[in-house]
Image: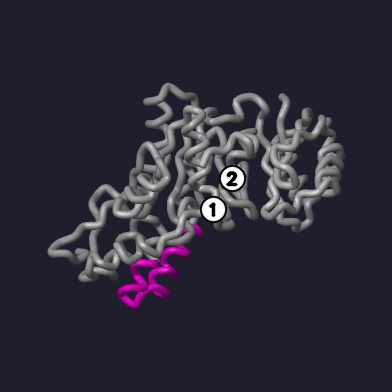
Amino acid sequence: MPHILTLVAAAGALDPALLARCRQALEALGARPGTPDWLAEAEAVDLPFTDAPAELAAAAARTALDGAPVDAIAVPAEGRRKRLLVADMDSTIVTSETLDEIAAFAGLKDEIAAITRRSMNGELDFAQALHARVGMLAGLDVAALEATWQATAMMPGAATLVATMRAHGAVCCLASGGFTFFTGRVAQRLGFDHHVSNTLLIEDGKLTGKVAEPVFDRNAKLATLTRLATENALPMAATLAVGDGANDLDMIGAAGLGVAFRAKPIVATAARARVDHADLLALLFAQGYRRAEFRD
C-alpha cells in the first residue's frame, strides 16, 4: 500500500539534508521513497513511499532526525483528509490544564496539579482523580472560573486547524475531561460544531465540590468518536482524534488518524502518530493540506 511520510518542522528548521537522512532511513527499511512534495517551504514536506509499514517508517525517520525539532508522521496515501475531528481540550486545544488553574485561586494548584499529572500519566483512575480534585475546591467562588477563562490561551494552530477542516466539510468536536464552562467558550471561539465534557455543580455562586454524573471519561471520549462517526455516516478510517493524556488513549487508538500531541509518555508510546515539536498545524500537514489551503 502506498504511504506518505510527512515531516513538519517546529520553526522553519526543515532543510534538504534532514529530508535526505529520512529518505535514507526509509531505504534502509527496504521501502521505496518517491519524489518529495513540499507543502510549505522549510516547514512541511511529503515523502511518498511503498513497501514498509507506516509506524516503522515514522520511527525510522525520527531516529534519523536525531533530535532535530521536526515531527515525522506516516499515513496511508488513501483517505488522508479526515471528515471528523475529535479533540481533547486541556494541553491540546488550550495551552493549560484548566482545573489546575482554577485550583490556583484556592491556593491548591501544586497539590491538584500533582494529581492531574498522575491521572494523565495513567497512574490513577480518571473518575476517582477528578472527584478528588473537584472535592478539594468545595466552596470556591465561581468568579475563579471566569478569571481562569480570561487567562486561558488557545494552542497555536488550533483556530486554523478547526477552520480549515470545517471549510473542507469536516465535523469538529471538542471532547474533554474538563468542564462545560470552558469547553462551551472554547468551542464558540474556535468554531467547533460540538463540545462534550463534565459539568461542575454550583450552588449559591460557589462550587459544591461535585460534578454531575456520569463522569465524561476515556470511555465517553471513545463513545463520542464512534457516535459522531455513525451519525455522519463515516467509517472510522475517516476520523481524526488528538489528545495528550491517558484518558485520550482509547479514542486515539480507534481513530483513522490518532495523534498524541506533546503527550505524556504513555500516550506518545502507544499512539500510531505523534507530534512532539510542531504546533497543531501539523495535523493539517499530516492530512496533506498545503499552507495555501489553510483558513483562519
Picture coordinates of residue 287, whole percent (x, y)? 61, 34
Give above or below for 73 relative to 202: above
Residue 178 image-quadrant placement: bottom left
Q: Can you see residue 144?
A: yes
Residue pointed to by mark 1 = 156
Horizontal side of residue 218 vs 208, given as left or right: right
Going from N to C along the chain, the mark reached first, 2 or 1, is 1
Residue 108 image-quadrant placement: bottom left
Q: Amino acid at mark 2?
A: Leu
Residue pointed to by mark 2 = 281
Dot 2, crowdedness within 10 Å: few (<14), some or many (≥20)?
Answer: many
- From this viewpoint, which residue is outermost toward the bottom? 107
Highlighted range, magenta: 101-122
Picture coordinates of residue 292, whole percent (x, y)? 63, 36
Give above or below for 194 relative to 198: above
Residue found 61% across the figure and 44% down from its top: 282
Picture coordinates of residue 36, whole percent (x, y)? 79, 34
Q: Amino acid at mark 1?
A: Pro
